Amino acid sequence: MSSSPVPSILHVDMDAFYASVELRDNPSLAGLPVCVGGPASGRGVIAAASYEARAFGVHSAMPTAEARRRCPELVLLPPDFDKYTSVSREIMGVFQRYTPMVEPLSLDEAFLDVTGSERLFGDGIQVGRSIKADILRETGLVASVGVAPTKFLAKLASDLDKPDGFRVIREGEVREVLDPLPVSKIYGVGPRLTQRLEALGVRTVSDLADLPRDEVRQRFGASGLWIHDLAHGIDPRRVTPRREEKSHGMERTFPEDLADPDQLRQFLLSFCEEVAFTLRDKGLRGRTVTLKARYGDFSTVTRSKTLDYPTNLGPRIFKVAHELLGRIERRPLRLLGVSVSKLEDVRRPQQGSLFNGHPSSRDLWIESQSRLARATESLDRLRRRHGRAIVLPASLLGQEAPRQASGRPEQPGGETDPPDSER
């Protein structure tokens, strides 16, 4: 074994998370090719595939129709993001017991820095094994864990022995692990960049590491320097516990292009209500509302409006989003979405008028917002207790819940993209 010190950066990644949750809750599906995703009859995509399904070449982000062709016996289940979010909270709670330095990337993965936790819980390897055992015991789910000196190497390590993996990369083992890997294993090297590198004869990480740094910079700019550093195992990024959330949104690709204004309005309203609830749940509000629309020819347009005052209330967001919808060309839409950005903590005070006398328009707005917020609080308590669909605007009764749609809510977090990367 290498004499290098035990590293302290962990990457924990749940194996086939959505599918695994469904298999846990329905053991009769064990051994079957199970997928979570949208229907094959439209433009549904696979959100998660069990390892039995992956044996047929099925993978996440694949059109469900293609997955059906590859695996006619596929068991397709609709996503239940409320359930996955609840399980995710349990898993994140396990992490927090070992270190406050937890950086969630999505519902099912996170970086941890266990530096300083050694006296209580042991070194990075011991903590990784304890976390893996705790998750299995408390949730019935399997995680893969990577332990390494940097975030890039830890994420790479967690993927090397999946499923049910546990891999440690020490300082002295970096070249041994990296060199034989395909260059596409470097974070930020997508299909296009892989092709460009292979055209230069660069097929492995070793090939990339051997190139002169200046040559890589000249050919690929800032992203070239980034991937060249990673090829040498260099990654200065730190584990950041409180990632600043820049936006939250939701979008859906429709089974067929949709032109009916009433239907578009209903979908938009459901998205706005869902986004607003999530913002409230996270203690956030935002000022900029953005509408995203994609036509049948795949051309995409966005329209944005920044409010005078931030909000996290569905009716406010919908009013702006509907106005933005009226500003785009009226053609059948393939996709529709809405997001809210310029977020702030709800605990930040909203300043009213500084002067006595008649209330200002801002004072009136704050009072109106407060009344609506108070009414919404009690409804949110019902949503958290009985599910989000328990309280809906009257016009949405009987409509498909957005969280069951083929599109899903944007998940905050995720690694920061490398500069100018081709993904």
Image (cartoon, rainbow, N blue to C red):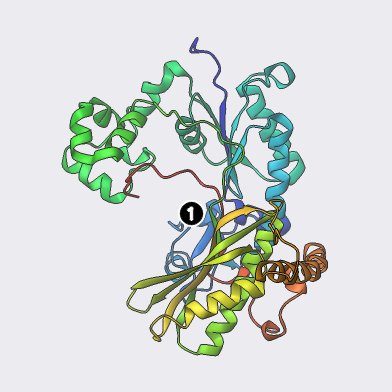
The residue at which mark 1 appears reads as 54
Q: Is residue 3 left or right of residue 226?
A: right
**Residue 292 in the image: x percent, y percent?**
45, 70
Examine the image and state in which quarter residue 174 appears.
Answer: top left
Disc 1 marks a residue whose amino acid type is: Arg
Q: Nearer the viewer, residue 231 or 161?
A: 231
Label 1: how many Cα within 10 Å (few below 14, some 14–19, many 20+): some
Examine the image and state in which quarter residue 411 appears.
Answer: bottom right
Relative to residue 338, is residue 344 depicted above or below? above
**Residue 358 in the image: x percent, y percent?**
74, 71
Q: Is residue 15 left or right of residue 423?
A: right
Q: Nearer the viewer, residue 66 or 376?
A: 376
Residue 333 visible? The answer is yes
Q: Nearer the viewer, residue 306 or 34?
A: 306
The mark tally for this picture is: 1
Question: Residue at left 21%, top 45%?
Answer: 196
Relative to residue 313, is residue 211 depicted above or below? above
**Residue 301 in the image: x percent, y percent?**
38, 72
Relative to residue 352, is residue 406 depicted above or below? below
Describe the element under mark 1 as helix, strand or loop.
Answer: helix
Relative to residue 248, is residue 329 depicted above or below? below
Question: Residue at left 71%, top 48%?
Answer: 89
**Residue 289 in the image: x percent, y percent?**
53, 67
Residue 27 visible? The answer is no
